[in-house]
Amino acid sequence: MGRIALFILFSLFNTAPIFAQITLSGKVTDKEKGAPIDYVMVTLKDKSSGTILGYSQTATDGSFTVKAKLEIVKKSSLHFSLMGYREEVRSLSETAIQTFDIAMEMSEVQLKEVVIKSRKIWEQGDTIVYSVSNFATEQDRTIGDVLKKMPGFDVQKDGRIYYNGKSINKFYIEGRDMLE
């Protein structure tokens, strides 16, 4: 019976290294200013496949902590990334350093061109709103000239305004009723 107990006890202690965890920690700072950088994404990636095995984000003081199994750390690399900074990568090995001081260098990010177009016409509750700037040109002399270009509007010579054949009784420009 003593041998069986000794065998079980030995087996339990022998499997402990398989489940051993390692804590990777450190601080990320700006290379130029020396100030801590917060919100840096810290990812532990498999060197061969690039699969994310663990992750963390730096705190306001630039500190981070990533926990992982020792067997994973042996075949991984630690990546530090934040928009506006060059990505930093640290390779890890079996005798991995557990504390890292990372100084990140700023870099410019060129964004693709963005085109913003306003809507010409939209509904707001029971009101149809027109963006006058989408209909106006330099040749227009009066608001009537612009209204004539808007779908559904008809401006009479005497100044009366019709919308879809019906006379309108309220006409607002920037919140002011122009027919009062």
Image (spheres, helix red, strand yellow):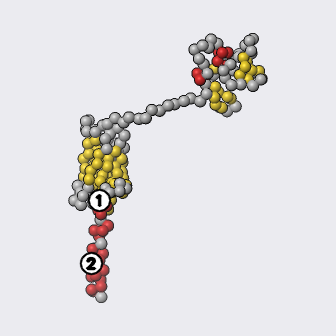
Q: Is residue 152 above or below residue 51?
A: above
Q: Which residue is mark 2?
A: 10
| Residue 73 % position (x, y) | 29, 59
Separation (CA) of disc 2 from disc 1:
28 Å
Quadrant the C terminus occupies? top right
Q: In the image, which disc is placed on residue 64?
A: none
Q: In the image, what residue occupies the spot 64% across and 20% down? A: 173
Does 139 sit left or right of 30 as displayed? right
Q: In the image, what residue occupies the spot 43% across and 35% down? A: 112
Q: Secondary structure at mark 2?
A: helix
Does 107 sit left or right of 125 as displayed? left
Q: What is the three-letter code of the residue carrying label 2? A: Phe
**Observer-nearest of 107 and 27:** 107
Q: In the image, which disc is placed on residue 75?
A: 1
**Observer-nearest of 90 and 30:** 90
> Toward which corner of the image does residue 21 lie, by quadrant?
bottom left
Does 9 sit left or right of 111 as displayed? left
Mark 1: few, some, or many residues within 10 Å (few <14, many ≥20)?
some
Q: What is the three-letter code of the residue carrying label 1? A: Lys
| Residue 151 % position (x, y) | 68, 25
| Residue 78 % position (x, y) | 30, 52
